[in-house]
Image (spheres, grey):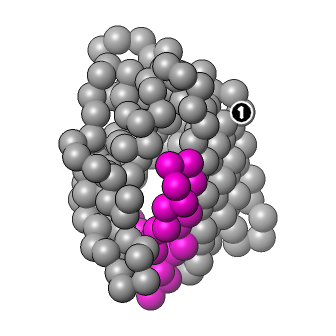
Amino acid sequence: MASSAAVIESLTVAKDGSDYVAEARFVIDAPHDTVFGAFTAFDRLSDLNPAVIESRAEMLANGSVRVTTRLKECLAFFCRSVAVVEDVSIDGLNVVQAIMVPELSDFARGHTTWRFADLGRRTRVHYKSRVTPRFWLPAMIGSRVVRNALQRQIRTASEHLESGAEASGKPIGT
């Protein structure tokens, strides 16, 4: 597989009470339309992230999109499948916001914001998330596990997009 030209400018994960707070800024060597289209092709999220084993999207009456994903992450020999259901709104071609639906998720609460900046042939992505898992993560290594998973997901998504792969059709909700 080709080496990723993505530049991770910053990546932090911290525990704040029962919440995990993550923030990342990275640049993908692919045009804005390609990156934004792939990140908003909610039924094809496994193309960007191999931890996604299932994803589907449905339009809601209020114009947002309910996105249901099932993720599988492994730490050494321990693997966990996690359900994530979020109501997602798209603001133009630059901002995606997701609010966790706790009664359908393995999280008590959460919200995520993705911001996309057009840099010509490259795209800067700013990711911010605060989630409260209902499942156990070891206190001493939980933040490190989340950080490593996020870093791996950024690299994988970047490699996919930089190889010229694009989402088919128009992003859902635009």
The residue tagged 1 is 10
| 27 relative position to 46: left or right | right
Q: Is residue 138 visible?
A: no
Q: Residue at x 70, y 72 (%)?
A: 18
Residue 174 screen position, x and y as percent: 38, 59
Quadrant housing residue 42 = bottom left
Q: Nearer the viewer, residue 40 or 15?
A: 40
Q: Is residue 71 above or below residue 151?
A: below
Q: Is residue 32 above or below residue 43?
A: above
**View extreme (top): residue:** 2
Which span is picked out in magenta? 81-103
Quadrant housing residue 65 = bottom left
Residue 10 screen position, x and y as percent: 71, 33
Q: Residue at x 33, y 28 (%)?
A: 160
Dot 1 amino acid type: Ser
Residue 93 screen position, x and y as percent: 50, 49
Q: Residue at x 49, y 82 (%)?
A: 102
Quadrant housing residue 47 = top left
Q: Is residue 25 above or below residue 87?
A: above
